[in-house]
Amino acid sequence: MRLGIVGCALGMHRVDHTKVRKVYGRETSHCSRCRQVLEQEPEGHWIVPPMHDAGLGQRPR
Ligand SMILES: [Zn+2]
């Protein structure tokens, strides 16, 4: 939905709480509107991880 994407462009992603998974001790999920991968910081703040790119070509060394 376009209206949702506007919110995402402003950094206001909507975390899909039904898809939360623990990866390496961190809770990860994605935005239910734009599918941006999100990570939850220990204090409960959801951020966009800078390096994870959903397998689009960037490999960890
Ligand atoms: Zn989003």
Image (cartoon, grey):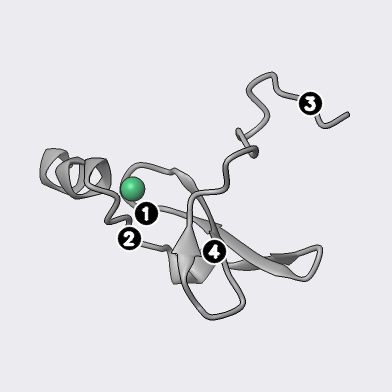
Q: Which residue is mark 2?
A: 14
Rounded to the nearest angstrom, the CA distance separating label 4 from label 1 is: 9 Å
* Three-letter code, disc 1: Ser
Rounded to the nearest angstrom, the CA distance separating label 3 from label 4 is: 23 Å
Q: Earlier in the sequence, mark 4 or mark 1?
A: 4
26 vs 1, nearest the viewer: 26
Q: Residues within 10 Å of mark 2 (few under 14, many from 20)?
A: some
Mark 2 and ligand 1: say if the CB distance to the nearest ligand atom is below 8 Å: yes
Q: Earlier in the sequence, mark 1 or mark 2?
A: 2
Rounded to the nearest angstrom, the CA distance separating label 1 from label 3 is: 25 Å
The total of numbered circles placed on residues is 4
Q: Residues within 10 Å of mark 3 (few under 14, many from 20)?
A: few
Observer-side mark, 1 or 3, equals 3
Q: Which residue is mark 3?
A: 59
* Three-letter code, disc 2: Arg
Q: Earlier in the sequence, mark 3 or mark 2?
A: 2
Observer-side mark, 3 or 4, equals 3
Quadrant location of residue 32?
bottom left
Rounded to the nearest angstrom, the CA distance separating label 1 from label 2 is: 6 Å
* Three-letter code, disc 4: Lys
Q: Residues within 10 Å of mark 4 (few under 14, many from 20)?
A: few
Name, please, the residue furthest toward the top: 57
22 in relation to 53, above or below: below
Residue 8 position, x and y percent, is: 26, 46
Q: Which residue is mark 4?
A: 19
Rounded to the nearest angstrom, the CA distance separating label 2 from label 4 is: 12 Å
* Three-letter code, disc 3: Arg
Q: Earlier in the sequence, mark 2 or mark 4?
A: 2
Residue at the spot x=45%, y=43% of the render? 36
Observer-side mark, 2 or 4, equals 2
Residue at the spot x=14%, y=38% of the render? 2
Rounded to the nearest angstrom, the CA distance separating label 3 from label 2 is: 27 Å
